[in-house]
Image (cartoon, rainbow, N blue to C red):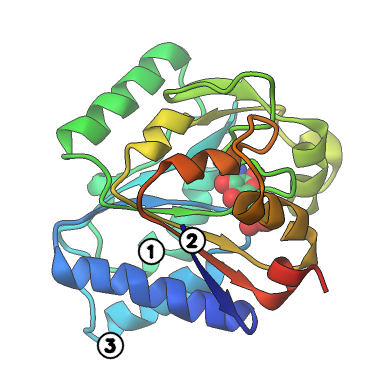
Amino acid sequence: MRVIVCKNYDEISKTAADIIASQVILKPDSVLGLATGSTPVGTYKLLAEKNKAGVIDFKDVTTFNLDEYYPISPENDQSYRYFMNDNLFNHINIDITRTHVLNGMAEDTDKECDEFEKMIEAAGGIDLQVLGIGQNGHIGFNEPDEELVAKTHLTGLTENTIQANSRFFEKIEDVPTQSLTMGIATILATRKIIILASGKNKHEAVDKLINGGITTSNPATMLKLHPDVIVICDEEAYTGK
Ligand code: GLP
């Protein structure tokens, strides 16, 4: 695992956007795995700027998002589909039919998850996966537990995550208590991973990811099993100061 310690959030965004841009330049029909949360917002902004400036072309790019709340409508401004359209897809020349976000309204969630896995496979697998990290070490919505789930599945959110994500909702009761998420094996099957972390509140999770052993109580540590992971964090997340 490589670790890049950036000065601050802006530098994380620049580094991540440069890596994603290089991926798309090297392979114009790349399959990207994308994340939501506040951390990648700056990265997406820079990607939109690079697209506008003609540096990268998203015409042939396919995307799969990590996770989605459940139940939630794609029109809800807190849904991850809405987030992706609003923060990235509406600002780049991507074919929206090539963007895949799990359906937060799916009646048959097993079928939804199974089809999602099949679509990733049919697209040839994910070339580059962007990840954030929860304060408790979750990746996607794979929460700390005694056991982790391999493939895309429906899962419950921990109190810690509901609390952390409530900042985006009017009141905590509005935060969905479940989600659909890629599983650990889905994430580990991607060819290259960048994981972004900013701020002191991520220090404990980042420290365990870099220095700890592999444990289901910090799902991000599973990334130690992957041959090509780059942790991109700022000094605050790295040092806790
Ligand atoms: C959310 C998402 C994750 C994200 C994480 C961190 O719950 N499900 O995919 O990486 O929490 O979010 P943030 O970047 O806002 O700290």
Q: Secondary structure at mark 1?
A: helix
Name the residue beneath numbered marker 1. Answer: 90
Q: Residues within 10 Å of mark 1 (few under 14, many from 20)?
A: few
Are circles 2 and 3 on residues that touch, CB within 8 Å?
no
Label 2 within 8 A of ligand 1 by Cβ: no
Nearer to the camera, 3 or 59: 3
Name the residue beneath numbered marker 3. Answer: 53
Q: Residue at x 28, y 78 (%)?
A: 51
3D distance between C-alphas at marks 3 and 1? 16 Å
Are circles 1 and 2 on residues that touch, CB within 8 Å?
yes
3D distance between C-alphas at marks 2 and 3? 19 Å
Q: Residue at x 24, y 25 (%)?
A: 118
Does any portion of residue 47 appear in the rendered image? no
Is residue 145 toward the left or the right of residue 51 in the image? right
3D distance between C-alphas at marks 1 and 2? 6 Å
Q: Residue at x 41, y 38 (%)?
A: 187
Q: Residue at x 59, y 37 (%)?
A: 214
Name the residue beneath numbered marker 2. Answer: 86
Tell me the amino acid under the disc marked 3: Ala
